[in-house]
Amino acid sequence: MKNTGKKLKNSLCFLLIFLMALTGCDSDTEIKPNAKEIADISPAAGFLAAQVEKTRGFIAGPIENGQKVSDYAYVYDNAVALMALAEAGADWHVQRLADAFVFAQEHDRLFRDGRLRNAYTGGNPKSDSGRSITGGKVTIRLPGFWEKGRWQEDYYMVSTSTGNMAWVMLALCKAAERAMPEKKEEYIQAAMRAADFVLTLKDKKGGFTGGYEGWDETQIKARHKSTEHNIDLISAFRCLAKAVAEKNAGKAEEYRAAAEHAKEFVLSMYDPKLHCFYAGTEADGITLSKGVYPLDTNSLAILALEEMKEKEEIIAFAEENMMVGGGFDFSAGDLDGIWNEGTAQMALCYHQLEKNEKYEAVLRYLKTQLSPDGSIPAADRDGVSTGFTVSGAEVLWEYHNTQSIGATAWYALAKMKANPLR
C-alpha cells in the first residue's frame, strides 16, 4: 500500500512537471523590466510588453474600449513586435514570443517542413486555449470561427507567406542574440528550419516565390514574386548566415548565396527612370506587376540595402508621389490617407540618411496617433486603399483607423532609431 502510494505520488509529480513544461508556466519571479518600465523607453514598446504579459505568447488585435475585437495573431506583427521589444531590452517578453514561434513551427497539424502559417490564435500556444489534439498529437490551434454549425478558417490566415517567414527568421535571430546558450541554439535551429523551407521556393528565373496559399492538403504554390518579400529575405538570410557561420560554415555560405539571389531579383525590380521599385512579378515570374507602386518596397529597400546608391532618388519619389500631410500613403495613386506602418518606416529611412529634421517631423505626426495605452492605429482614417485585393477573396485590401500591432511595433522601432533589417 505504501509503495503504491509512493508510485502514485511520483506519477502525479511527473505529470505536474510535464504539464508545466507543456503549458510554459512561468515562475513567480518578477518580470524585469516590466511593461511600465519599458514604456519609459518607448510607450509603444510598453504597450507591446503589456500585451505579452497578458497573453504569455502571441499578441492578437485590435483592442477597442478595453475589449479584444479579434483573436487573430498575425505572424508578421508578432515578429516585428519581438524585434521592437528586443531593442527595448525586454528579454522576458522576447522569449515568450520566440517560444511561441518555435512551438507553432513544431506543432503544425499537418506540415513538418519548417513553415509557419500567416496567423495563429492569440495567447500562449502551449495553453489549453492555444492547442488542440489532432490525430493523437498536440497541435497549435489556428484561428477561425463557427458559422452555420461548421468551423470556418480564413484562406489567408492558414496560408504561408514568404515575407512572413523572413520576418520570423529575423525575429528568431534577434531572440537568439539575447538568449541563454540553450535557448539560443533552439532559436537558431528554428530559424534554420524556416530558412530551409524558404529555399524550396527559390525560382530559377530569379528571387523567391510568394509561398503557399489555401487549406492544408489543397494548398497551392503561389507563383508570383514580391519585391517586398525578397527584400525581407536579403536581411533574413544575411542575419542567419552570420549567426551560424562559426558552427556551420557550409550552411552560412548557402544562406549568403540565397541572400544574393534575392538581392539580384530585387535590383531587377528597380526602375532607374521612375526611381522606384515595382511590386514584383505576376504568376509567370517574369511579367512586371506595374499596377501599384507600394511605399514599403521602397522604404524597406533603403533600410535593408546599405550598399544601394539610389536612396536619395527613392526618397524623392516617395515624397513626391505618396506623401499625405505629415505622413505617407500605402502606395502612389489616390492619396486617400496615411498608412502609419509605412510612415514609421520612412522615419527610419530619414534617420538612416541623417535627414534629422524630416525624421523629427514624421515622429511628431506619429505622436498624434498615439493612444493612451501606447498603441497607434493602422491608418489615420478608415478606408485607406492599397490598390490590392485580399488574398483568396475579391475584397479590396484597405487599412482602417483601428489599433495595429504592426504599426505600433514599427513606431517603437522608429522612436528608438532601430533598423530591424540590418
Image (cartoon, rainbow, N blue to C red):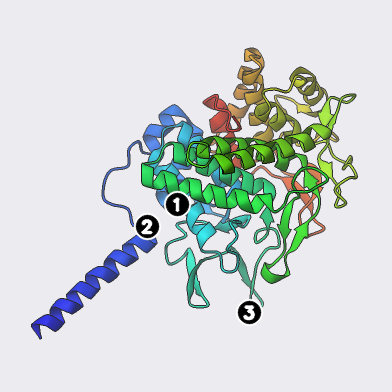
In the depicted structure, whether residue 381 falls above or below residue 347: below
Circle nearer the N terminus (2, 1): 2
Decide: marks 2, 1 in contact (CB < 8 A)? Answer: yes
What is the secondary structure assignment of the residue under circle 2?
A: loop
Q: Residue at x 83, y 45 (%)?
A: 205
Give the label on residue 99, or none.
1
| Disc 1 versus disc 3: nearer the observer | 1
Q: Residue at x 72, y 65 (%)?
A: 219
In the depicted structure, whether residue 412 falls above or below residue 15: above
Please, which residue is most extreme toward the bottom here? 1
Instruction: Give residue 308's position: percent from left, percent from top.
Output: 73, 23
Q: In the rendered image, which quarter contains the N terminus?
A: bottom left
Instruction: Give residue 331's position: percent from left, percent from top.
Output: 79, 36
Q: Measure the C-alpha gap from mark 1 to mark 3.
A: 33 Å
Q: In the rendered image, which quarter contains the C terminus?
A: top right
Circle nearer the N terminus (1, 3): 1
Report the residue marked by disc 2: 24
Report the residue marked by disc 3: 149
Res 306 seen here: yes
Q: Residue at x 71, y 43 (%)?
A: 229
Amino acid at dot 3: Gly
Residue 299, image quadrant? top right
* Frontmost residue, 417 versus 179: 179
Q: Measure the C-alpha gap from mark 2 to mark 1.
A: 9 Å
Instruction: Give residue 342's position: percent from left, percent from top.
Output: 68, 33
Q: Measure the C-alpha gap from mark 3 to mark 2.
A: 32 Å
Amino acid at dot 2: Gly
**Label 2 neighbour load within 10 Å: few <14, some 14-19, many 20+:** some
